[in-house]
């Protein structure tokens, strides 16, 4: 990999990881639309670790409260809606909403990673789930925060997150769509989606790292380090400005982007 490729891929990953436009689709499309070789699994893991570091740092105060309250809830044997502390309850919701994607990913990961990377499929997913996001945003109800979720809400959002294993769907996009349809505010939907990314990204990266450790591949550690830093910085900036942006303007610009990109991909590769 040359340094231009490192910079472009790291920034693309950092910016698209938390926008509702599918980071996996963009990482697949960059080598498809250029003369670059596929960056490989090692670099993908590195840039995802950068995004993970960004969201952990951004929500560090929330995570500290949630972790402390969650540990306290274990002592009183509380779970879910039976927990009085809102931070502990939110921590339980994040953990429970992670179960569906882990189960589906465990069973279908190899099939999806090998058979569902087609630009045509990505285009269809971008358009279809983009229209659904647009509908959810236009028809959003008043708005609950992430602290007002119920068990039913969490299961719906968790189930929707499992669909993000399909490239072009967007993990953040589908979870925010589900949250909006369930009556959450834009900010609440975004914040819960970002918190959900932490265990999912950590688990996925851990599994991939385990595979890399067992593989005799050579690693360009300088490129990996640069990817982590650049992805982390761009992801942190994205999180900060995205929440402020959607509170004022909403999701429609991202809906338009998804549809335009999806139509372009279908026109090029059909």
Image (cartoon, helix red, strand yellow):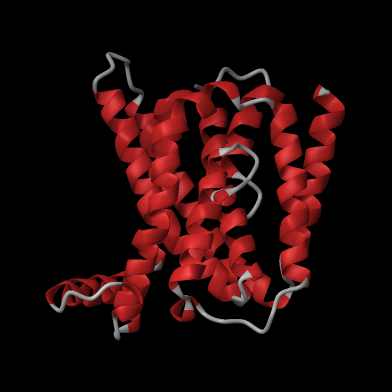
**Foreground residue, 13 or 114?**
114
Q: Is residue 53 among what the camera can see? A: no
Q: Position of residue 108 (x, y in %)?
A: 46, 31
Vertical arrangement, residue 54 with respect to residue 11, above or below: below
Q: In this image, 86 relative to 157: left or right?
A: left
Q: Position of residue 179 (x, y in %)?
A: 58, 67
Q: Residue at x 35, y 82 (%)?
A: 86
**Foreground residue, 30 or 148?**
148
Q: Residue at x 77, y 45 (%)?
A: 127
Q: Residue at x 37, y 73 (%)?
A: 90
Vertical arrangement, residue 262 with respect to residue 251, above or below: above
Q: Residue at x 52, y 61 (%)?
A: 157
Q: Position of residue 210 (x, y in %)?
A: 26, 30
**Quadrant hosting residue 245:** bottom right
Q: Residue at the far top: name it.
A: 216
Vertical arrangement, residue 55 with respect to residue 170, above or below: below
Q: Position of residue 35 (x, y in %)?
A: 67, 18
Q: Quadrant of the C terminus?
A: top right
């Amino acid at each position: 990999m040359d340094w231009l490729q490192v910079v472009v891929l790291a920034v693309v990953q950092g910016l698209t990881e938390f926008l509702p436009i599918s980071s996996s689709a963009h990482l697949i499309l960059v080598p498809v639309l250029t003369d670059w070789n596929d960056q490989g699994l090692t670099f993908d893991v590195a840039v995802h670790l950068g995004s993970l570091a960004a969201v952990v740092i951004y929500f560090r105060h929330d995570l500290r409260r949630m972790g402390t309250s969650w540990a306290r809830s274990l002592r009183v044997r509380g779970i879910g809606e039976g927990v009085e502390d809102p931070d502990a309850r939110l921590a339980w919701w994040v953990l429970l909403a992670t179960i569906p994607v882990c189960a589906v990913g465990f069973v279908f990961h190899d099939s999806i990673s090998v058979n569902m990377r087609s630009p045509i499929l990505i285009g269809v997913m971008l358009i279809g789930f983009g229209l659904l996001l647009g509908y959810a945003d236009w028809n959003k109800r008043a708005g609950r925060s992430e602290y007002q979720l119920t068990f039913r809400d969490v299961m719906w959002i968790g189930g929707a997150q499992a669909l993000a294993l399909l490239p072009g769907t967007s993990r953040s996009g589908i979870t925010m769509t589900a949250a909006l349809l369930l009556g959450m505010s834009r900010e609440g939907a975004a914040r819960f989606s970002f918190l959900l990314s932490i265990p999912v990204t950590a688990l996925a990266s851990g599994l991939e790292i385990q595979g890399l450790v067992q593989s005799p591949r050579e690693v360009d550690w300088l490129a990996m380090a640069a990817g982590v830093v650049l992805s982390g910085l761009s992801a942190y900036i994205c999180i900060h400005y995205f929440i402020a942006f959607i509170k004022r303007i909403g999701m429609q610009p991202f809906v338009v982007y998804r549809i335009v990109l999806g139509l372009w991909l279908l026109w090029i590769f059909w």
